[in-house]
């Protein structure tokens, strides 16, 4: 159950086209699309069933070990990256759970019902266990672009998007605000462009396909059914969306590439986020809170290293500050700052190793990525969690 009048959006899979385990893009995550939205009344919505669904299922199996899960699952379309987690979703193998699946009929099968499409996905020779052997209760509800209906106080609106073989975008609207999920869409068809803007109007959170750069979209990737950060920014500005989330990252886009796309987008529209596995957005009608629970957590070691850090604040202004590293891991560090840096922003750290007898202390120059903020021990301080992304040249002027 979420806090009164608050909804949460949890990101379990954010990668497009195919899952990837490359170390170069592990920070944002390599699982394919899956989101979980929890409405203020506790109703659960799952948006798409990519490989991120497996991790969501494992987590919910632990947290709901003694009570059933009742969730509404919305599939935007049937391409592999949006359904390949279903066979590995542990709650489907337990009878105490119940799931309602929603999506459109397929025009590419003789019997293109939602149920038939999912049964075909798990039929021989593609998978050893078929859908009928899953004991969880299941219902199948077919929806089309233009449909609008209500589930426990959340209004759902579906609209067609421009994608090969079709794709649905969904708008979820309740007392906490408006969440729009519009993955796998490409600009260029006027009627569908207008439909997407209608779907997104006034959204508090607009989750949009940003698989390609504007240059790729105008060139070799044109016609592949995806969008860019620039198109998302244009829509958000036109329709008054408050926050834009770049989603469906290309499997060949490293963390550094996504960082670069995010920086470019924020130069034109400040309230932009790059979807990352473990990121949770909380919407309560008064504003938006963002938490990024980075997957690579290890035991912290107490430390007190002097450091100079530089970064960008929430106000968009650069800052430099002297501080102490309070604790450190092989992947990151935690420190307190008088400045309040932007989440998902870059920070440079010049860390001073303590001097030893007869030797001066040395410096380590690192580039980090802000994944967490929390209140500090004093009102003017902010606790900041960093993930280190690379070691910089010893001469900080070249970094």
Image (spheres, rainbow, N blue to C red):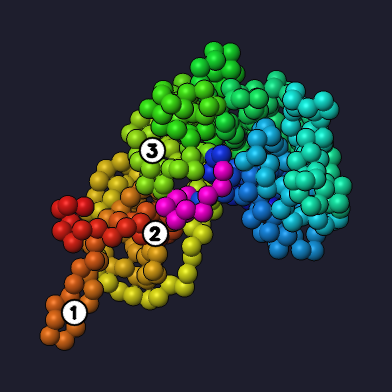
Q: Residue 137: x, y in percent?
A: 86, 48
Q: Which of the two discs, 3 and 2, labels the residue nearer the N terminus?
A: 3
Write the residue at 73% across / 60% down: 61
Read off the magenta span. 18-28
Q: CA distance from mark 3 to mark 2?
A: 19 Å
* Residue 219 sits above or below residue 80 on the image: above
Residue 395 placement, left or right of 52: left
Dot 2 lies on which element? strand
Q: Position of residue 37 (x, y in %)?
A: 64, 44
- Kindly identify which residue carries mark 3: 261
Place of residue 179 in the rendered image (x, y in percent of width and height, measured from the top left):
59, 35
Whether tag 2 and tag 1 are in contact, CB under 8 A, the answer is no
Kindly indicate whether the residue at mark 2 contacts the one at mark 3 (C-beta within 8 angstroms). no
User: How busy is the neighbourhood of tag 3: few (under 14 within 10 Å), some, or many (20 plus)?
Assistant: many
SS label for mark 1? loop
Residue drawn at the location 58% of the way across and 13% of the way down:
191
Is 138 drawn above or below residue 178 in the view shown?
below
**In the displayed structure, does residue 307 sit left or right of residue 208?**
left
User: Is 109 on the left-hand or right-hand side of 75?
Assistant: right
Of the numbered discs in the image, which one, if any, rests on residue 146? none
| Label whose residue precedes the other's in the sequence (2 or 1) | 1
Task: Give the residue at mark 1.
Answer: 355
Q: Earlier in the sequence, mark 3 or mark 1?
A: 3
> Residues under labels 2 and 1: Cα distance?
25 Å
110 or 386, which is in the foreground?
A: 110
10 Å neighbourhood of mark 1: few (<14), some, or many (≥20)?
Answer: few
Kindly tell me whether residue 38 is visible in this rendering. no
């Amino acid at each position: 159950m979420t806090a009164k009048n608050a909804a949460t959006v949890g990101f379990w899979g954010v990668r497009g086209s195919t899952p990837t385990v490359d170390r170069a893009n592990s920070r944002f995550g390599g699982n394919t699309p899956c989101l979980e939205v929890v409405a203020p009344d506790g109703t659960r919505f799952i948006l798409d069933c990519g490989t991120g669904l497996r991790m969501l299922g494992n987590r919910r199996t632990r947290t709901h070990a003694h009570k059933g899960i009742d969730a509404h699952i919305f599939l935007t379309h049937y391409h592999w990256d949006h359904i390949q987690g279903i066979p590995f979703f542990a709650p489907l193998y337990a009878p105490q759970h119940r799931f309602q699946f929603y999506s459109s009929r397929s025009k590419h099968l003789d019997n293109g019902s939602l149920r038939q499409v999912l049964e075909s996905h798990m039929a021989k020779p593609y998978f050893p266990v078929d859908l009928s052997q899953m004991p969880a209760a299941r219902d199948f509800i077919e929806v089309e672009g233009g449909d609008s209906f209500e589930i426990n106080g959340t209004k759902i609106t579906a609209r067609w998007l421009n994608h090969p073989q079709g794709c649905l975008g969904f708008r979820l609207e309740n007392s906490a605000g408006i969440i729009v999920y519009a993955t796998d869409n490409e600009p260029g068809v006027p009627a569908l462009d207008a439909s997407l803007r209608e779907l997104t109007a006034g959204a508090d959170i607009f989750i949009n396909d940003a698989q390609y750069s504007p240059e790729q979209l105008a060139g070799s990737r044109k016609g592949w059914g995806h969008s860019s950060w620039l198109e998302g920014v244009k829509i958000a500005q036109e329709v008054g969306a408050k926050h834009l989330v770049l989603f469906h990252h290309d499997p060949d886009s490293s963390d550094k590439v996504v960082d670069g796309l995010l920086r470019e987008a924020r130069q034109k529209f400040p309230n932009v986020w790059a979807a990352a596995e473990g990121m949770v957005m909380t919407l309560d009608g008064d504003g938006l809170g963002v938490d990024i629970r980075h997957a690579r957590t290890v035991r912290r070691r107490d430390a007190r290293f002097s450091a100079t850090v530089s970064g960008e604040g929430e106000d968009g202004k650069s800052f430099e500050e002297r501080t102490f590293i309070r604790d450190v891991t092989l992947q990151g560090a935690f420190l307190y700052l008088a400045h309040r840096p932007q989440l998902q922003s870059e920070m440079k750290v010049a860390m001073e190793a303590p001097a030893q007898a007869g030797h001066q202390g040395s410096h380590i120059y690192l580039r980090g990525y802000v994944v967490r903020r929390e209140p500090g021990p004093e009102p003017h301080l902010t606790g900041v969690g960093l993930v280190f992304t690379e070691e910089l040249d010893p001469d900080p002027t070249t970094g």
